[in-house]
Image (tube, helix red, strand yellow):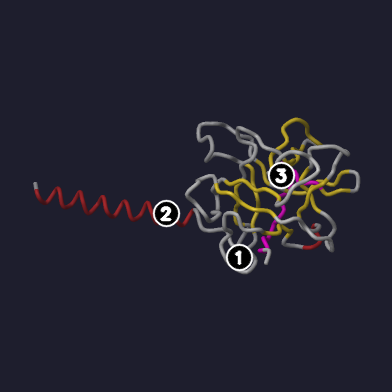
Amino acid sequence: MKLNKNLIRRLSLVWLIMAISAASAQNSAVLDSSGQPLRRGVEYIIKPAITDNGGPFTLIDRNGSCPFYVGQRNVTADGIPVTFAPFDDGENVVRELSSFKVAFSGATTCEQSTTWKVDHSGKVDGRRLIATGDDPRYSNYFLINKSGELDGVYIIDWCPADVCPICKFICGSLGSLFENGQLLAALDGSALPLVFDRVV
């Protein structure tokens, strides 16, 4: 009987170590352009990994009124810094495939949050736009995936499975949509590879 208990303990320990290793491998820290992990509350500029794909992310006044939308300016323009807030309140590092909120730093003329959210109210060319504002449910939660084999290059997805594991979402990757001379952030098209520059 002692042999069986020892064997069970050892196998349990081996399984626990394997589970922890698998979990940590799947949820690596997202790195900024200098190779440091993205941290809760620290300001970053989000910009395309390839400059031919537009400039840094900023607020876009799409229709002359609130809410503002997320989009890109031209390559030479400055972006607006953002901060990240992981879904897990105890987590201070943004991890791959883990839900988080992202918000532009500072206030706007719209008296609302600058937190990114999926705008489910209307589509442009069949694509969902990224607006700003709070959503009490799931629209504010995004996640980051590595883009291929390049270090420090990522794709932002909307698929809040951490927030509601039993829900069925129509997930999508963040890309750009050209509308009326402006580049808007939108889901359901080609993914836009991104880098994150820490604001110093």
Q: Return the residue nearer the eye: 130 or 19.
A: 130
Disc with the residue nearer the chain's start (3 vs 2): 2
* Tag 2 and tag 1, C-beta contact below 8 Å: no
The residue tagged 3 is: 114
**Does the magenta-highlighted stretch encompass residue 20?**
no
Dot 3 amino acid type: Thr
Q: Is residue 196 magenta?
A: yes
Q: Answer above or below: position of 154 versus 117.
A: below
User: Residue shown at 68%/53% (left/top)?
Assistant: 82
Q: Which residues are magenta?
A: 184-198
Dot 2 corresponds to which residue? Answer: 22
Q: Position of residue 3 (x, y in %)?
A: 11, 51
Residue indicated by mark 1: 151
In which quadrant of the rendered image does the C terminus lie?
Answer: bottom right
**48 left or right, relative to 94:** right
Q: Is residue 150 left or right of residue 184?
A: left
Real-space Cα separation, disc 3 to disc 2, in angstroms: 35 Å
Q: At which x and y percent is residue 29?
A: 53, 58
Q: CA distance from mark 2 to mark 1?
A: 20 Å
Q: Nearest the camera: 86 or 10?
A: 86
